[in-house]
């Protein structure tokens, strides 16, 4: 077991609700939101002579995080009550569920608390495969062909090897799509942001007395296929702008009043969990300094620089 403390700095009394959430059962919508960001529904086919069809079919639901987020992954495992956690290499910890009985628990959850990103389409295809496997159809050639057709529509489609082995696959089914997503619950937003959010601080050269200025940033990033979801979140928060780039789309909030009056209060009420909660607390500290005009003094700017030096990828302490 990796040993990482979930305690927050004592001076952060304002965020005691965040600490409380670390030790409580996860909200179902938080779990779905987090899975919309970091969950993965996988259907694999591997050659295996033990099967009459010559192929072994396997379904996996998994979430992979940096090892520093082991506690959050354990909370997710405890929520579902199934699956296992293992180290993948030296830096990644992964939660995965593979057995038919355990996958039924996962499927029941996402039936009751549906995903709203395009990942929902992979879930629905995953569920179709699960139903075929439950009926043992994958052990027949016709059933195997149906599963290959489903896999062709999931995630990144068929590998070159599978295309070589199944050259005549005709897509008799269509990939379901999520159209006009609706935010189901604020806890979904907290979960999604815990996976996909970024709280950042920029110190840049400017025509000020100190020659530098400070900008706070809240960013959510998704694959371009989920642009509508990003627009939906922008409307939900009533702030920010959408920026497209190759293969991805960002929702960015950088206006100080929006960060201070909308983003921070929202996540105080519906806390971020995991390592990103540390960045949220640091951003909140800096926002407090800026509200009191401390960033306009050399002492305050240096204090902000010190906090920034241990945020995001620069973070070296997790207690």
Image (spheres, grey):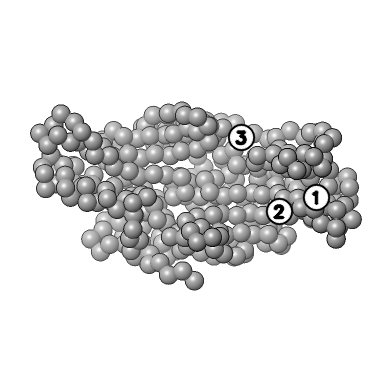
Whole-percent x, y for residue 232 in the image: 48, 33
Q: Describe the element under mark 1 as helix, strand or loop.
A: helix
Residue at the spot x=29%, y=42% of the render? 201
Residue at the spot x=61%, y=35% of the render? 178
Q: Is residue 200 above or below residue 51?
A: above
Left/right of residue 72 with respect to residue 181 in the rendered view? left
Quick one: label 2 or label 1, which is nearer the N terminus? Answer: 2
Q: Give the camera-side residue of 166 and 135.
A: 166
Is residue 29 at least partly visible in the picture? no
Q: Give the camera-side residue of 139 and 281.
A: 139
Q: Quadrant of residue 199?
A: top left
Whole-percent x, y for residue 306 in the image: 22, 51
> Which residue is identified by label 3?
178
> Disc 3 versus disc 1: distance between alpha carbons?
23 Å
> Which residue is identified by label 2?
59
Which of the numbered marks, if any, corresponds to residue 45? none
> Which residue is identified by label 1?
132
* Pointer 2 with pointer 3, Cβ within 8 A: no
Residue at the spot x=80%, y=50% of the render? 132
Depth check, mark 2 against mark 1: the one in front is: 2
Q: Is residue 16 above or below residue 267?
A: below
> Disc 2 versus disc 1: distance between alpha carbons?
11 Å
Left/right of residue 65 with respect to residue 311 in the rendered view? right
Quick one: label 3 or label 1, which is nearer the N terminus? Answer: 1
Q: Quadrant of residue 264?
A: top left
Neighbourhood count class around disc 2 (C-alpha, 10 Å): few under 14, some 14–19, many 20 upward: many
Q: Describe the element under mark 3 as helix, strand or loop.
A: loop
């Amino acid at each position: 077991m990796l040993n990482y403390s979930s305690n927050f700095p004592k001076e952060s009394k304002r965020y005691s609700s965040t600490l409380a959430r670390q030790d409580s059962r996860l909200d179902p919508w938080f779990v779905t939101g987090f899975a919309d960001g970091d969950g993965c529904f996988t259907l694999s086919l591997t050659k295996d002579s033990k099967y009459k069809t010559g192929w072994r079919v396997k379904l996996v639901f998994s979430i992979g995080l940096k090892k520093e987020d082991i506690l959050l992954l354990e909370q997710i495992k405890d929520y579902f009550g199934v699956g296992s956690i293992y180290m993948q290499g030296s830096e990644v910890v992964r939660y995965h569920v593979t057995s038919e009985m355990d996958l039924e628990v996962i499927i029941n959850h996402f039936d009751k608390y549906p995903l709203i990103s395009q990942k929902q389409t992979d879930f629905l295809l995953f569920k179709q495969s699960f139903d075929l496997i439950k009926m043992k159809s994958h052990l027949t050639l016709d059933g195997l062909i149906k599963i290959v057709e489903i896999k062709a529509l999931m995630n990144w489609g068929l590998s070159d090897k599978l295309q070589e082995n199944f050259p005549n696959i005709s897509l008799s089914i269509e990939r379901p799509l999520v159209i006009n997503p609706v935010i189901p619950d604020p806890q979904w937003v907290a979960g999604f942001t815990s996976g996909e959010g970024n709280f950042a601080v920029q110190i840049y050269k400017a025509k000020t007395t100190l020659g530098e200025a400070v900008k706070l940033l809240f960013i959510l990033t998704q694959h371009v296929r989920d642009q509508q979801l990003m627009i939906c979140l922008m409307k939900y928060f009533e702030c920010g702008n959408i920026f497209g780039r190759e293969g991805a789309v960002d929702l960015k909030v950088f206006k100080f009043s929006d960060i201070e009056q909308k983003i921070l209060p929202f996540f105080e009420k519906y806390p971020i969990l995991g390592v990103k909660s540390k960045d949220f607390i640091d951003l909140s500290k800096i926002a407090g300094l800026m509200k009191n005009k401390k960033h306009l003094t050399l002492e305050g700017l240096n204090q902000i620089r010190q906090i920034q030096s241990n945020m995001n990828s620069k973070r070296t302490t997790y207690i």
